[in-house]
Image: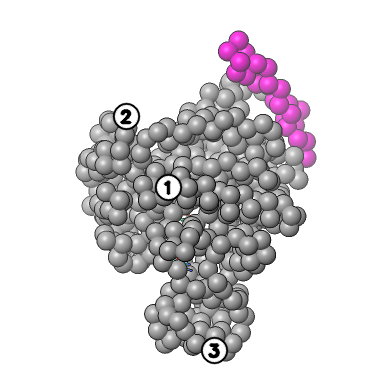
Amino acid sequence: MEVAVNHLQPGPDGRAAVYTKHLKGIETEHPVGATVLVVGGGGRCHAIVDALSRSPQVGKIYCAPGNAGIAAQAECVPLKDTQVEQLRDFALEKGVDLTVVGPEVALAAGITDAFTAAGLRIFGPTKAAAVIESSKDFAKQLMAKYNVPTAAYRTFEDYNEALEYVSKGPFPVVLKYDGLAAGKGVVIPETLEEADHTLRDMLLDDKFGKGKVVVEEFLTGPEFSFMCFVDGERVWPMALSQDHKRAYEGDKGPNTGGMGAYSPLPFITEEDREYAMEHIMKPVASAMVKEDRPFKGVLYGGLMKTPSGIKVIEFNCRFGDPETEVVLPLLKTDIYDIFSAVADGSAMPEIKWEQKSSMGFVMASKGYPGSYEKGFPIEGLEDALSDPEVRIYHMGTAVKDGKTVTSGGRVLMVIGSGDTLLQARDRALTAVDKIRCDNLFWRRDIGWRVL
Ligand code: AMP
Ligand code: GLY
């Protein structure tokens, strides 16, 4: 296959003026700026597409598969995030200059390896580095080896051995399935009976797949998300954030993909942040290099401020969802420069953040995270967006008969920004109240512990 060659000629304002591509022998003139492909289709990818569209260097954005909201800012491509070869061929055919990957499944499927082998620039870790998320056992072993603070643990493959260990207590105990389980692989039983039931599901009945179980000490304290841009040993922090995983107000009900988030975090001091950077994020990036799995992309630390210090709950190998939706609107630096510096291993500009607060509310289909119906029309979106301090990122929407309709469990995220978290919240909730749809519910108490 012939590889695309891009000729960028700087214009008078420093941006690319003429963009000629030689592709399979055909010469075409493209509009000003770089062509970017974003892989994924939820609220997180909408936030990435929105940040890219603020870059003067970006001319064309494709998003695969995207959604109805993303379609206003990018050309949606009907390819799934795991169709790695088709995505690679698409990027070659369209002369894509940079690809940014949202979901972990694509990274665990080796999208970065496939793109790199084809000479394509991509932002996201290789399959070998993505194991920091796809294998809880790998992450725990890495932390033990490099003295990174985390909960005590043991890994089991055998049901009887696991049960014997767990039966000695204490309870609650944390049971984690060792593999990607879409956020549903963690169970925290209060009794031996419940623990036995979960161990049977995970180790005897393969309800989650064929894998191991990590048994962890139960920690307490507020959780927070520390996302960093990482290129090998180089680590740059993003604004801190917290998400709310439970479905109902007061942090009650079943776990979800996240019902809201906010940034910054009043309960994390500058000292805490410094500690997390120096004792967790930087040592882990450097450990990955030593293990011959250099990490490039976003390293997400799911951390907890426990009575005995900050400890790691989990690592993810990608932007958090819904944290990205509240963090990226605060980014002042051109995100295309950041992605390029990581992808190319080149100089990073100083990364600047708005000294503002951001809070987002997820509007979900009634029934979520259980079963729910789709196809309900959504109205009032334009009115809700009339406040310039409000953003709406689509999580699960589609277009039917020219109307935006619900098409997923989580449907929209409405984000407000302001000088304080209270201001951000009030702006977001005012916008939420302008949206009309018969089948949505949402929590109004995001950030309740700090407001
Ligand atoms: P994870 O997928 O590893 O982030 O786990 C999902 C959720 O389970 C976390 O956000 C925590 O609320 C909880 N959790 C995981 N590990 C622990 C632990 N060791 N102690 C207490 N809670 C935990
Ligand atoms: N918000 C948690 C995650 O992205 O995994």
Q: CA distance from mark 3 to mark 2?
A: 58 Å
Residue 319 visible in the shown view: no
Q: Secondary structure at mark 1?
A: loop
Q: Nearer the viewer, residue 448 or 55?
A: 448
Residue 350 visible in the shown view: yes
Residue 310 placement, left or right of 250: right
Residue drawn at the location 42% of the way across and 32% of the way down: 354
Check disc 2: other Cα within 10 Å, few if <14, some if 14-19, many if 20+. Answer: few
Q: CA distance from mark 2 to mark 1?
A: 30 Å
Residue drawn at the location 68% of the way across and 55% of the way down: 287
Residue 415 placement, left or right of 435: right
Q: Amino acid at mark 2?
A: Pro
Provide the residue designation for mark 1. Answer: 269
Residue 14 in which image quadrant = top right
Could you tell which of marks 3 and 1 lies nearer the N-terminus?
Answer: 3
Where residue 167 sits: x, y (%)? 49, 88
Q: Which residues are magenta?
A: 1-25
Could you tell which of marks 3 and 2 lies nearer the N-terminus?
Answer: 3
Extreme-top residue of the structure:
12
Provide the residue designation for mark 3. Answer: 164
User: Which numbered disc covers residue 388?
Assistant: 2
Q: Amino acid at mark 1?
A: Thr
Where residue 171 sits: x, y (%)? 42, 80
